[in-house]
Amino acid sequence: MIPTIEIANVSHVGRRRPHNEDSTLTDAESGLAILADGMGGYKAGEVASALAATEIYHSITTNLDQVKPVRASRRKNKSGLSLQSLLVKDAVIRANSDIYRTAQEVPDCLGMGTTIVVAWFHNNKATIAHVGDSRLYRKRKDHLQQLTRDHSLLQELVDRGLYTMEEAVATTPKNLVTRALGIDNSVDVDIMEETPEPGDVYLLCSDGLNDMVDDEEIHLTLSKYSANLVQAAQELVSLANAKGGKDNISVILIRILEGFSSTGGFLKQTLHQIFMKSGE
């Protein structure tokens, strides 16, 4: 079956920040969506996020021949992950090394880091990888679910049973991450695989969205503008700005229109890709 997806990609500086330290990358031919939210120093966060997005893209797209459809669907290591997922994990680890090395070698970049969330659609599967508190949601029919779990102090306090989520939100800064790329020479990458269904909408976002717009509003917006993915992405960004726009806001929306069976087989698909990075 010819794979068919639709992508909208919108990034905005927000209303409080002098420049945009988020980096987003979506690629039609490889079925990749990458979102990074940089941090640290004057424009160093922008460097970190750009390094992450480009390194991960390069690592995956230059190694597609290692995960041919037949071989990749049958071969897994003892972790239970497919070759595609192992490739994504390795790409994120390589990006971490590049960012860490640059931070040590370039004084202006010392201490820089970035979150990362990656979605790769292949062989009727989705590989999802993330580090930090940038998120991936899936809207399936009338249900919105956060598939990633934040690597943040707030989430850790809740997981340990020290606070309820409501208590943690009221007492804990939202932007303290417990994992990020580039902070150390090694990194623990969360990775999962799932099976998309036609009609599913996947949302990748930086915390500039979900810190300002709650999950219920995100769900309502995706439902209201379901006929126009670009308009839905733009409306989510507008909502975050209307509520204060305290951070950069990046949104990638991906709609599954049909099944897809080939690794990186997006060469023949019908894909509408919109990229906007505005308000700088």
Image (cartoon, rainbow, N blue to C red):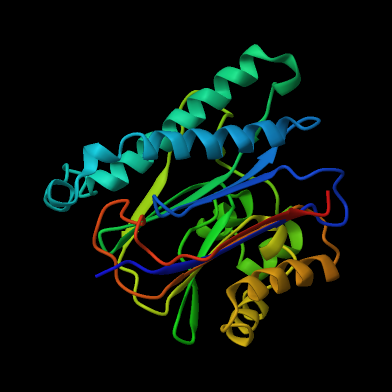
Q: Residue at x 11, y 51 (%)?
A: 74
In the rendered view, would you say 140 is above or below 248?
A: below
- Residue 23 at x, y percent in the picture: 64, 45
Residue 254 seen anywhere in this rendered image of the structure: yes
Q: Residue at x 70, y 36 (%)?
A: 46
Q: Quadrant of residue 174?
A: bottom right
View extreme (top): residue: 105
Q: Residue at x 62, y 36 (%)?
A: 50
Given residues 276 and 124, the one toward you in this image is: 276
Q: Quadrant of residue 40?
A: top right
- Residue 134 at x, y percent in the picture: 59, 53
Q: Relative to 194, is 186 on the left or the right?
A: right
- Residue 185 at x, y percent in the picture: 49, 23
Q: How many marks?
A: 0
Given residues 127 and 177, the one toward you in this image is: 127
Residue 243 seen anywhere in this rendered image of the structure: no
Q: Relative to 280, is 66 on the left or the right?
A: left
- Residue 91 at x, y percent in the picture: 40, 35
Q: Relative to 98, is 80 on the left or the right?
A: left
**Screen quadrant of the N terminus:** bottom left
Q: Residue at x 32, y 51 (%)?
A: 264
